[in-house]
């Protein structure tokens, strides 16, 4: 990613903060993680890491567009997909959690990992997000693959 794309990503992400300047300072001088409220610019669908990593791999294999911003929390073993805000959406499945308005998400800056949280696909600053339909299809396919593997791999 170019420096200009990093900067656009920083501006886009920090816009979700109550105080964007404080957010940037926290990234640079604090512990590297800012708590940002979901629901205004994006929602986050958090899934178990095995499911999320396999789904992200499927999304990368699709002809286009590239996947939207995606975080991994290695301590919690979760992958978070950034989606358009949609208070009416219902995501149903074992281990699926949706962060929307009123929820806070720990987010590192787009240019580096912090603590146990890092970007698998950092935001590019354009505002592009995961398409819910494409993500749902990838999660269904990934879940089917994990179900086949479950006799040998604990999910």
Image (cartoon, rainbow, N blue to C red):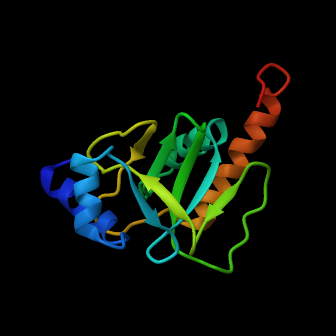
Residue 135: image location, x then y, percent: 60, 58
| Residue depicted at x 16% and y 49% | 2
Residue 75, placed above or below residue 47: above
Q: In this rendering, would 92 be left or right of 1?
A: right
| Residue depicted at x 64% and y 35% | 50
Residue 97: image location, x then y, percent: 68, 57
Q: In this rendering, would 103 be left or right of 139?
A: left
Using the rendered view, name the quadrant where residue 9 is placed.
Answer: bottom left
Residue 55 visible in the snapshot: yes
Q: In this rendering, would 11 be left or right of 136?
A: left
Front residue of 93 and 118: 118
Front residue of 102 and 7: 102
Residue 136, placed above or below residue 57: below
In the orientation shown, which residue stands out farthest toward the bottom? 88
Front residue of 77 and 136: 77
Residue 104: image location, x then y, percent: 52, 63
| Residue depicted at x 53% and y 55% | 81
For the C terminus, which image quadrant? top right
| Residue depicted at x 37% and y 49% | 33
Query: For the image shown, how many numbered marks are present on the structure?
Result: 0
Residue 9 visible in the snapshot: no
Residue 20: image location, x then y, percent: 27, 69
In the orientation shown, which residue stands out farthest toward the right? 151
Residue 88, placed above or below residue 106: below
Using the rendered view, name the quadrant where residue 99 is placed.
Answer: bottom right
In the orientation shown, which residue stands out farthest toward the top? 152
Q: In this rendering, would 59 be left or right of 13?
A: right
């Amino acid at each position: 990613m170019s420096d200009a794309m990093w900067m656009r990503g920083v501006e886009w992400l920090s816009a979700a903060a109550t105080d964007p300047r404080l957010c940037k300072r926290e990234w640079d001088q604090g512990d590297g993680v800012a708590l940002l409220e979901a629901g205004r610019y994006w929602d986050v669908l958090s899934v178990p890491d095995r499911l999320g990593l396999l789904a992200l791999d499927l999304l990368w294999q699709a002809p286009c567009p590239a996947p939207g911003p995606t975080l991994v929390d290695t301590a919690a073993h979760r992958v978070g997909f950034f989606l358009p805000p949609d208070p009416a959406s219902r995501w149903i499945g074992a281990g699926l959690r949706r962060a929307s308005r009123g929820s806070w998400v720990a987010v590192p800056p787009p240019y580096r990992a912090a603590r146990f949280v890092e970007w698998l696909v950092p935001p590019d600053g354009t505002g592009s997000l995961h398409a819910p339909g494409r993500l749902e299809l990838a999660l269904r396919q990934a879940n089917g693959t994990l179900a086949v593997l479950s006799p040998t791999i604990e999910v």
